[in-house]
Image (cartoon, grey):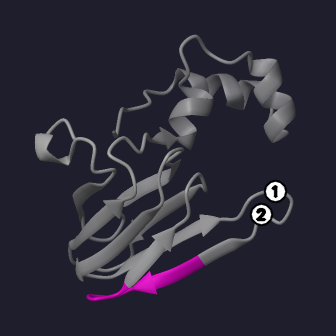
Amino acid sequence: MAQILGLNTFSISLVRIDYAPYGGLNPPYTHPRATEILMVLEGTLYVGFVTSNTDNRLITKVLNPGDVFVFPVGLIHFQFNIGNTKVVAFTGLSSQNPGVITIANAVFGSNPPINPDVLTKAFQLDKNIVTYLQSKFWWDNN
């Protein structure tokens, strides 16, 4: 909406995403206010989402040009380029303000940081690993 003012009040958003050859990644994230539909125009993209508790089932698919995949509102999802060429995709979202929460950024890069004892217990990790992850640079990929 900030880039296409005409979308204001229409409750939709559209995004073009270009993924680098093998390894281009949109890391696990969620849209708290929108369902997402993605269509691949070029390349091969491995996509998936995780259903909600208690099932936590991983649903995945390899998409080729012309393929479409839907990510339900609020569920953690990702996209990963598994091909040797770039991927071009378009995503439509069912909100003019879908929001985005990148999981690693939110958990390990919050400001102020989450108490490492909480993350150590939640992820069953050594406290040194949690502290190391919190010290890494977490980028804003919004």
- Give the x, y percent position of residue 102: 49, 41
Q: CA distance from mark 1 to mark 2?
A: 5 Å
- Residue 100 visible to the viewer: yes
- Give the x, y percent position of residue 138: 44, 30
Q: Amino acid at mark 1?
A: Asn
Identify the secondary structure beneath mark 2: loop
In the rendered view of the protein, which quadrant contains the C terminus? top left
- Give the x, y percent position of residue 66: 27, 89
Residue shown at 59%/66% (left/top)?
49
Q: Which quarter of the figure has residue 91?
A: bottom left
Other residues around mark 1 within 10 Å, as few (<14) / some (14–19) / many (≥20): few
Q: Mark 1 near mark 2, Cβ–Cβ under 8 Å?
A: yes
Residue shown at 49%/61% (left/top)?
78
Identify the secondary structure beneath mark 1: loop
Residue shown at 38%/50% (left/top)?
95
Q: Which quarter of the figure has residue 60?
A: bottom right
- Residue placed farthest to the front in the image? 9
Q: Is residue 133 above or below residue 59?
A: above
Residue shown at 85%/39% (left/top)?
124
Q: Amino acid at mark 2?
A: Asn
Count of marks placed on residues: 2
Horizontal side of 63 relative to 132 (left or right) equals left
Horizontal side of 35 relative to 54 (left or right) equals left
Q: Is residue 16 above or below residue 132?
A: below
Q: Which residue is mark 2?
A: 56
**Does 64 lie within the magenta span?**
yes
Q: Is residue 87 above or below residue 51?
A: below
Give the magenta range: 60-67
Q: Which residue is mark 1?
A: 53
- Residue placed farthest to the top in the image? 112
